[in-house]
Image (cartoon, rainbow, N blue to C red):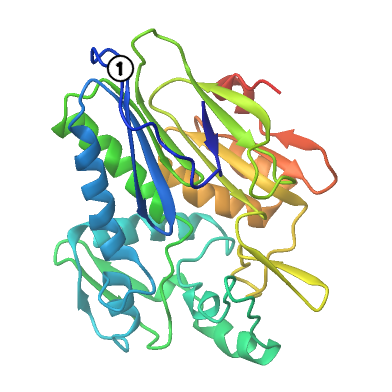
């Protein structure tokens, strides 16, 4: 069974000796362990790992040679980027336009001030100075020329809320178009994309992690999902630190530059597009459960499951239909 949000799970080294079962593999990219379970083509594992390395090199905010870092450092000049980067940014801007301030890929002006590994909190003055540089409307992408330009020289892109979902969709396309794989589960940390139907016809079983068991493997329920779907979880437990008695988490509100104030400990989104599921999981987390359910209900083939800080759970209208969720 796959599990959302459980990073670092060891993959089985190989499949059945007669080739009838899946083969498993893993790689490290996007600051997480990426694991793959593939039926029908043993060679697909190497292709998937290579593709992850390709996208990681393009999108790593903290690698000065990446496309994203070069755009951030360009002082407002147009930058030539890989066509994949331009495509991702163009799609990300569409989600920004729909999110009413809840999702913004220029959050980097603020997010780079925080260090959740070292437990560093920027001052209120630093946050206030950075906030005017958060504004997705100042990002201009020319897909034909593969160039990106920021109106604000001090703006910074941060694609942490959508990049893994985009990559998962591209990996599914790779399996479909360039391998003989018949079915697969792709897990990029808390992002899972499902391709095809397992040989026995059974659904994929995906566990939703218990946010009150940080670093553990406890789940609150299991989604039984058909191929062609993606599930993405955003949660408070992913990266946190405590300072002076206050706990800070890495999901920032683009409107305040601070960790989002929400009634939600984690939200899992299910829909066919992993790109959409990733962007929505961040958006719905910032929105909170009530508004988040409304947003999910406004989209076709989209379900959301919220675990609340009160200890309860709520779900959008389509969640159970899409996931056959079992508590």
Q: Is residue 9 visible to the viewer in this orientation of the structure?
A: yes
Report the side of 17 relative to 240 (left or right): left
Residue at the top extreme, as displayed: 200
Q: Residue at x 68, y 50 (%)?
A: 214
Q: Which residue is mark 1?
A: 16
Q: Secondary structure at mark 1?
A: loop
Instruction: Determine the image quadrant of residue 238.
Output: bottom right
Report the side of 105 relative to 176 (left or right): right
Q: How many marks?
A: 1
Q: Residue at x 58, y 54 (%)?
A: 283
Given residues 318 and 181, the one toward you in this image is: 181
Given residues 150 and 204, the one toward you in this image is: 204
Q: Residue at x 26, y 71 (%)?
A: 67
Q: Position of residue 271 (x, y in %)?
A: 48, 34
Instruction: Determine the image quadrant of residue 54.
Output: bottom left
Instruction: Determine the image quadrant of residue 250.
Output: bottom right
Q: Position of residue 8 (x, y in %)?
A: 48, 47
Quadrant placement of the C terminus: top right
Q: Position of residue 109 (x, y in %)?
A: 49, 80
Does 23 appear above or below 102? above
């Amino acid at each position: 069974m796959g599990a959302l949000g459980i990073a670092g799970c060891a993959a089985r080294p190989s499949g059945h000796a007669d080739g009838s079962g899946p083969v498993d593999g893993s790689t490290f990219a996007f600051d997480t362990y990426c694991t793959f379970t593939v039926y029908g083509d043993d060679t697909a594992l190497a292709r998937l790992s290579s593709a992850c390395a390709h996208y990681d090199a393009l999108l790593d905010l903290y690698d000065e040679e990446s496309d994203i870092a070069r755009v951030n450092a360009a002082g407002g000049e147009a930058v030539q980027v890989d066509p994949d980067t331009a495509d991702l940014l163009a799609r990300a801007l569409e989600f920004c336009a729909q999110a009413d301030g809840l999702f913004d890929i220029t959050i980097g002006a603020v997010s780079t001030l925080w260090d959740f590994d070292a437990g560093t909190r920027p001052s209120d003055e630093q946050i206030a100075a950075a906030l005017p540089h958060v504004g997705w409307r100042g990002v201009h992408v020319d897909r034909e020329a593969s160039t990106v330009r920021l109106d604000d020289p001090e703006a910074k892109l941060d694609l942490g809320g959508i990049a893994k979902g985009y990559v998962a969709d591209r990996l599914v396309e790779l399996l479909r178009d360039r391998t003989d794989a018949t079915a697969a589960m792709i897990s990029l940390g808390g992002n899972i994309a499902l391709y095809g139907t397992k040989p026995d016809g059974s659904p994929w079983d995906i566990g939703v992690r218990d946010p009150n068991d940080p670093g553990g493997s406890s789940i609150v329920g299991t989604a039984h999902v058909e191929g062609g779907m993606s599930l993405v979880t955003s949660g408070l437990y992913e990266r946190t630190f405590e300072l002076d008695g206050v706990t800070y988490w890495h999901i920032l509100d683009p409107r305040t530059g601070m960790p989002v104030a929400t009634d939600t400990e984690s939200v899992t989104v299910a829909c066919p597009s992993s790109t959409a599921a990733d962007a929505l999981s961040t958006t719905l987390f910032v929105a909170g459960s009530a508004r988040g359910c409304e947003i999910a209900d406004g989209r076709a083939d989209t379900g959301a499951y919220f675990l609340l800080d009160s200890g309860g759970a709520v779900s959008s209208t389509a969640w159970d239909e899409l996931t056959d969720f079992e508590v």
